[in-house]
Image (tube, rainbow, N blue to C red):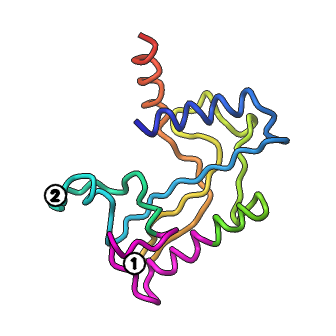
Amino acid sequence: MFIHPFYDLARTFVHTVDTNVHPLHLYVFNYTGPYTYASVFSGNMSNLDYGVVHSDELMYLFRMPAIFPDFSKNSTDAKLSQTLVRHFVNFAANRNSSPDPICHRKNFPLDSMDSICDYVSFQNGPSNSFVVEIDNKFDVSRMRLWDDVLQD
């Protein structure tokens, strides 16, 4: 429901729009913290591990004390929140952030089975930390399966 349309939109955009004039900036939020919208979406069935779900980054962008407890001041989650907010504010103010890869036709590999163009990835790091890095990993083989299914 999310991955195929995301991939298809990015692929279509970079092959139909001049990305030098209208650049495409992508990010993936794949950080697993102590709280998740999965508990809200699943009716608090916390015995299941849903991983990172749609909208989980929102609690790091906007405090939501009515739904989730606030993060401890010096916690990894508070630091991630500061980094994510800075990323979005820089993008809104300057149309770029750091890191700031741009998805172009030339770096969107249509013949690769495991990559997409470069994007910013927010994810868990070692020893209760987080990392922000540029990545391009993407399971394109799953996209081709859905292309076939949706064409039928």
- The tag earlier along the polypeptide, 1 or 2, is 2
x, y (%) of residue 136? Answer: 59, 47
Query: Is 62 placed above or below 134 here?
Result: below
Q: Is residue 7 left or right of residue 55?
A: right
Give the quarter of the figure containing the C terminus.
top left
Give the quarter of the figure containing the N terminus.
top left
For image coordinates 43% across by 85% down, the residue present is 75
Q: In the image as oriented, which residue stretches furthest toward the right?
A: 21
x, y (%) of residue 89? Answer: 67, 68
* Label 1 environment density (alpha carbons within 10 Å; few <14, some 14–19, many ≥20): few
Query: Is 147 placed above or below 138 here?
Result: above
Q: Are marks 1 and 2 in contact (CB under 8 Å)?
A: no
* SS for callout 1: loop
Q: Which mark is residue 4?
A: none
For image coordinates 50% across by 33% down, the residue present is 5
* Label 2 environment density (alpha carbons within 10 Å; few <14, some 14–19, many ≥20): few
For image coordinates 15% across by 60% down, the residue present is 47
x, y (%) of residue 4? Answer: 47, 33
For image coordinates 43% across by 74% down, the residue present is 126
Q: Is residue 75 left or right of residue 86?
A: left
Range of the magenta residues?
Answer: 60-85
x, y (%) of residue 130? Answer: 48, 72
Q: Which mark is residue 45?
A: 2
Query: Is 109 placed above or below 45 here?
Result: above
Q: Which residue is mark 1?
A: 128
